[in-house]
Image (cartoon, grey):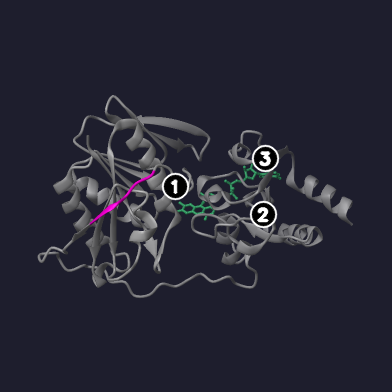
Amino acid sequence: MSEIFVVVEHRNGEIREITYQLLWKADELCRKGSHTLTAVVLCGEKENFISEINDRADRVILFEDERIKNFNGDLYKELLVRLIQEHKPILTLIGHTPWGMDYAPSISIKTGYPLATDCVDVIFENGRPKVVRQIYAGKIFSRVAFKDSEGYLITVRSGAFSIDKAGEHKGEVIKKDIPPDLPTARREFVAFEDAGAGAIDITQADLLVSIGRGVGEADKVPAMQELANLMGGVLSCSRPVVDKNWLPKYHQVGTSGKSVKPKVYLAFGISGAFQHVAGISGAGCVIAVNKDKKAPIFRVADFGVVDDLFKVAEALKAKLA
Ligand SMILES: Cc1cc2nc3c(=O)[nH]c(=O)nc-3n(C[C@H](O)[C@H](O)[C@H](O)COP(=O)(O)OP(=O)(O)OC[C@H]3O[C@@H](n4cnc5c(N)ncnc54)[C@H](O)[C@@H]3O)c2cc1C
């Protein structure tokens, strides 16, 4: 029997959703493989995260110190490496987030444990994890096996698993002291700056008309705004639309934009890259319009139209006018 570690992620005093997803998957792996589940929390003093996670893990290892209240890749890496070397967990699950992308590779180098990044599923086969990753912009799923190792590291894509509480656990809390020889960090947390809601708040909309690179040019955006207005919805977009300055950043849906939860999400000319669809996992009904019938967006769509987006938009406008 061995441990599975889950690194708890939090920001501004709140546990992030990815933590619950990792705990859900770790619980499933523990039940199938008779492992135990350990949540590792690195946080500031008196940040009360324990009550939110200790019924989802067998053990909670807690480091509390003002130096680690906010994310600091140098210190987090140092503490996690030492903890992994001490406990030798068979598997450490980390979010594929800016945190995880920052320290997971260096933990792998320091511990010698192999790392698979951005995984959307994990199973154990013959005592070793196997993962599923998406390649070619989400068009193909690849299964990746590890070479034999004492332990393994996996970063998990946000939205890949449920946030629900699965098995019953009674997490024993183990407080750990910060080692006196913890090196001084080379980076310093300065401030957390929220991108802000902007002129509109896409997170509160019931109907989002969302546009992607498929609209082709800035001049076409007003026609899609008009459709959103006619439908009583709000215009949102994928990242290239923001990168090209067709719309301001606060319209962007996705991992580096906003997570949205409309009743209906209409995706026009959006391919469905994982960074985008991770932001719409809370949507009630997803309707995709794309001229490519193999576009990954159709995998998450409840309804799909394979056609030119402008043809569909004009037909909708004609009905609503
Ligand atoms: C660290 C990182 C963070 C990221 N964060 C985000 C994020 O938060 N949000 C986000 O969206 N992306 C994000 N991305 C980018 C992401 O990987 C994709 O590149 C992006 O989502 C693709 O946007 P798109 O679907 O609009 O464009 P494309 O992938 O170019 O897709 C355009 C689609 O339009 C279709 N199309 C073209 N013309 C028409 C037409 N006339 N009618 C119908 N369909 C048409 C095409 O078939 C295609 O499927 C991030 C990337 C990285 C590396």
Q: Residues within 10 Å of mark 1 (few under 14, many from 20)?
A: some
Using the image, determine if residue 247 lies above or below residue 84.
Answer: below
Which mark is drawn over residue 210? 2
User: Mark 1 near ligand 1 (CB under 8 Å)?
Assistant: no
The image shows residue 261, relative to residue 286, as above or below, that is below
Q: Amino acid at mark 3?
A: Asp
Q: Residues within 10 Å of mark 3 (few under 14, many from 20)?
A: few
The circle drawn on residue 85 is none
- Tell me: is circle 2 under 8 Å from ligand 1: no
Q: CA distance from mark 3 to mark 1?
A: 26 Å
Q: Position of residue 178 (x, y in %)?
A: 16, 64
Locate residue 313 relative to residue 191 in the image: left or right. Answer: right
Magenta stretch: residue 170 in it?
Answer: yes
Q: Secondary structure at mark 3?
A: loop
Quarter of the figure with the C terminus: bottom right
> Along the polypeptide, which appears first: circle 3 or circle 1?
1
Residue lying at 29% horizontally and 69% vertically, measured from the top left = 44
At label 1, the amino acid type is Lys
Nearer the camera: disc 3 or disc 1? 1
Which residue has dot 1 on it? 165
The mark found on residue 302 in the picture is 3
First along the sequence among labels 2 and 1: 1
Image depth: mark 2 or mark 1 in front: 1
Q: CA distance from mark 3 to mark 2?
A: 15 Å
Numbered range of the magenta stretch: 168-173
Q: Quadrant of residue 293?
A: top right
Mark 3 or 2, closer to the camera: 3
Report which quarter residue 149 is drawn in.
top left
Residue closer to the observer: 84 or 268: 84
